[in-house]
Amino acid sequence: MAEPKKKRSKTRSRRARHNKNTNPIGLVNCEKCAAQILPHQVCPHCGNYKGKTL
Ligand SMILES: [Zn+2]
């Protein structure tokens, strides 16, 4: 029978590594005011979207 040589901790598990660098909330920084905003939406702070102020 194939047995794992060492017991993997939760942080070493494949799933934990997979989501390591992803933001769970999915926020991005506004290019203009650097505020944390939702992607693909107009910034509520400065009204910036794709380099244009709406
Ligand atoms: Zn902004």
Image (cartoon, rainbow, N blue to C red):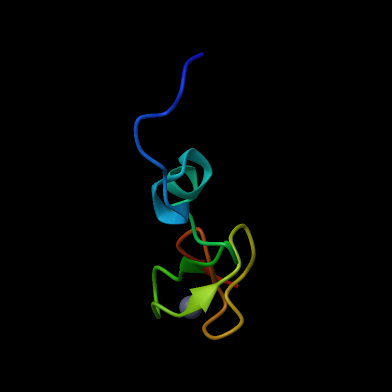
Between 48 and 11, the one lying in front of the other is 11
- From this viewpoint, which residue is outermost toward the front? 1
Please name the residue shown 52% across and 83% down the image. 46
| Quadrant position of the C terminus in the picture | bottom right
Between 45 and 54, the one lying in front of the other is 45
**Image position of 6 (left or right of 19):** left
- From this viewpoint, which residue is outermost toward the left? 5
Please name the residue shown 42% across and 54% down the image. 11
Q: Position of residue 4 (x, y in %)?
A: 42, 28
Between 30 and 50, the one lying in front of the other is 30
Q: Position of residue 53 (x, y in %)?
A: 52, 73
- From this viewpoint, which residue is outermost toward the bottom? 45
**Image position of 41 (left or right of 5):** right
Please name the residue shown 39% across and 77% down the image. 34
Q: How many marks?
A: 0
Is residue 2 placed above or below 45 in the rendered structure? above
Q: Position of residue 9 (x, y in %)?
A: 42, 52
